[in-house]
Image (cartoon, grey):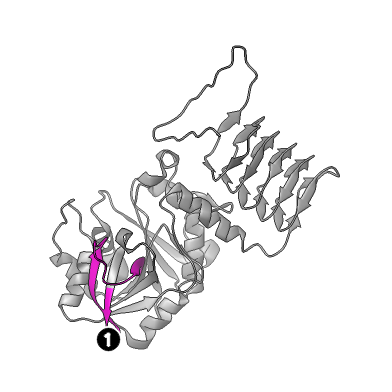
Amino acid sequence: MLKKGLLLCAGMGSRLRPITYTSAKHVLPVANKPLIHYTIEMLHKAGITEIGIVVGVNRHEIEGAVGDGSRWGVEVDYIVQDNPLGTAHAVSLAQDWAAGAPFLMVLGDILVENGITSVVEAFAKNHPASVVVLHKTDNPHQFGIAEIENGRIVGLEEKPESPKSNLAVAGIYVFQPCIFDVIGKVKPSPRGELELPDALRELIARNLVVQPLMLEGWWKDTGKPEDMIDLNRLLLEKITEASCRGNVDGQSSVVGRVVIESSAVVERSIIRGPVIVGPGSMIRDAYIGPYTSIGPGVTIEGSEVEYSIIMEKSVISGIKSRIGSSLIGKNVRITHERLMPSENRFVLGDSSLVNFA
């Protein structure tokens, strides 16, 4: 059985800026839990007990969120990629960690509905050189696409103009140790990086078995804000029952699958689940609609919010139009003041987005 799992988490998360200027994307909260926690849980459920995490400049944030892995019953080692020289380069740095054993590899910003136990089981049956997980896509022009013949992957194209299939590479693999020799033969791409698809093509060229495995259930790449918000929806949908460890007054209405954590306070408000309200938060004279995650220590008053992620210690106050489909970082203040003469005032970081209804 596979015991080793490698997570690639050195990426900068440029498509999630400005939030990732100050937070590693892998520790951003989804349904009030860091994304990387879900990934480690997924590995652990598949029987993986030794996890290597490739980190970059975000090393200290990820180490702070994960630690030594003991809370999940796994052993975690950190592998530093000082320069972002590509996915194949990141894998090559794990050769000593792998110690001659096959290993599962997952891109750190990928999450799937039904876990990866089926991937481990597929490898255990035939022990191919690689297992590559695929998912069907309606937009093959946007992904790496696999060509399959006789139960083997025989070709890979990156964002092809004329796709040969609708089977996109999902960012989940199993590799035999021969992958390290193959990466040693890969030449840098035009952007100066060692690319994992090139390594897979080299395996195919050597007539080694690269086995496809179709993914069932949803698949999410959390590279963009809208992806994070939609993943939040999918995870909140898994809430099976309501629970309340905070305080809700008699003038409030809490309907559906709503989780209210300890020391949270709800006053004169309406909450319609699925929703999670983090510990120490204050919801007052507000409406919180479905698929909203409210982090610890958040204050929302006199405002309406739905289908959004609000991170810890942020304040939303007196906003008359509904806030929706939003990803709001830590310690953000969104307020309305009645000033004369009327004006809008902003302090916004690079790559910020403001839409007025």
What residue is at 62 percent from the left and 64 percent from the top?
Answer: 238
Q: Is residue 129 visible?
A: no
Mark 1 highlights which residue?
150
Q: Is residue 309 visible?
A: yes
Q: Quadrant of the N terminus?
A: bottom left
Secondary element under disc 1, as helix, strand or loop, is: loop
Q: Position of residue 106 (x, y in %)?
A: 38, 65
Q: Position of residue 91 (x, y in %)?
A: 28, 63
The residue under label 1 is which amino acid type?
Answer: Asn
Q: Where 186 sits versus 27, above or below?
A: below
Q: Quadrant of the C terminus?
A: top right
What residue is at 15 percent from the left and 53 percent from the top?
Answer: 190
Main SS of residues in magenta: strand
Where on the picture, by quarter, is residue 23? Answer: top left
Q: Where 268 sits versus 6, above or below?
A: above
Where on the picture, by quarter, is residue 107? Answer: bottom left
Does residue 58 appear to the left or right of 96 in the view shown?
Answer: right
Camera-side residue of 357 and 271: 357
Camera-side residue of 313 and 221: 221
Does residue 346 appear to the left or right of 77 in the view shown?
Answer: right
Camera-side residue of 119 and 77: 119
Q: Position of residue 302 (x, y in %)?
A: 71, 33
Give the residue at the far top of this rendering: 341
Q: Where 261 sits versus 124, above or below?
A: above
| 341 drawn magenta | no
Q: Which residues are magenta?
A: 147-172
